[in-house]
Amino acid sequence: AQSVSQHNHHVILSEAASLELGCNYSYGGTVNLFWYVQYPGQHLQLLLKYFSGDPLVKGIKGFEAEFIKSKFSFNLRKPSVQWSDTAEYFCAVNSWGSQGNLIFGKGTKLSVKP
Amino acid sequence: GAGVSQSPRYKVAKRGQDVALRCDPISGHVSLFWYQQALGQGPEFLTYFQNEAQLDKSGLPSDRFFAERPEGSVSTLKIQRTQQEDSAVYLCASSLGGQGRYTEAFFGQGTRLTVV
């Protein structure tokens, strides 16, 4: 069965610090990979996605993620965080060609201190 | 608005009560998903509709959970004889494409169900 593991439950950073959130998945076939963000009081929003091609994916608000197939990883990065990045971040996968339902990790809460 | 709308936003139910949660997807979206998000967890898949057809209900935790989308637009998730372990946020998502054709899923804000 597919599963997604996010290594950090809560990350606290100061503004301008660099961010890397870990995500590993377990699945034997071809997958699509996603990062979603949930700002306080708001709905889940797609941050970026990877289907195929260049393993370095750029998303909104300066976020990027790198797919490393050999490590089953899809880590999220941002060179310099802002207070407005305070949110919960979810890594998710689905099977290539499937109906599209997502398997989510437990989420990482990011708190950025001004 | 143009997003996915869920109602009510909050629901408190007494144990044993039946509840109905509503989802209004984005107009024209073929696919509709329900997820359950327990406290401190990521969303977990419950069921999937392509238009009015319920193609996957493998995530429904028990036969007390029932979902429908009779006209291929609005969907209702019904929980009968609620129990405390049903307390969670119930998320609805819709996407333009159908099965096998990925298109971005847009999420509603969810309904927070508390069973007391």
Image (cartoon, coloured by chain):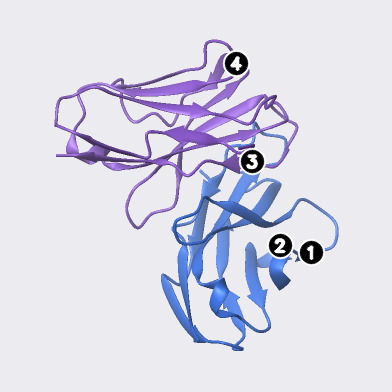
Chain colours: A blue, B purple
Residue B105 is marked as 3
Extreme right residue here?
A53
Q: Residue at x 73, y 38 (%)?
A: B103
Q: Nearer the viewer, mark 4 or mark 1?
A: 4
Q: Nearer the viewer, mark 3 or mark 1?
A: 3
User: Mark 2 belongs to which amino acid?
Assistant: Lys
User: Mark 3 belongs to which amino acid?
Assistant: Ala
Sequence-first tag of 1 and 2: 1
Depicted A5 relative to depicted A101: above or below: below
Q: Nearer the viewer, mark 4 or mark 2?
A: 4
User: Mark 4 belongs to which amino acid?
Assistant: Gly
Q: Residue at x 58, y 14 (%)?
A: B53
Q: Are marks 3 and 2 on the same chain?
A: no
- Chain letter of mark 2 equals A
Alpha carbon distance from label 1 to label 2: 9 Å
- The answer to whether mark 1 and mark 2 are in CB contact below 8 A is yes
Q: Secondary structure at mark 4?
A: loop
Residue A14 in percent (x, y) is at: 51, 88
User: Mark 1 belongs to which amino acid?
Assistant: Pro
Label 1, on which residue?
A55
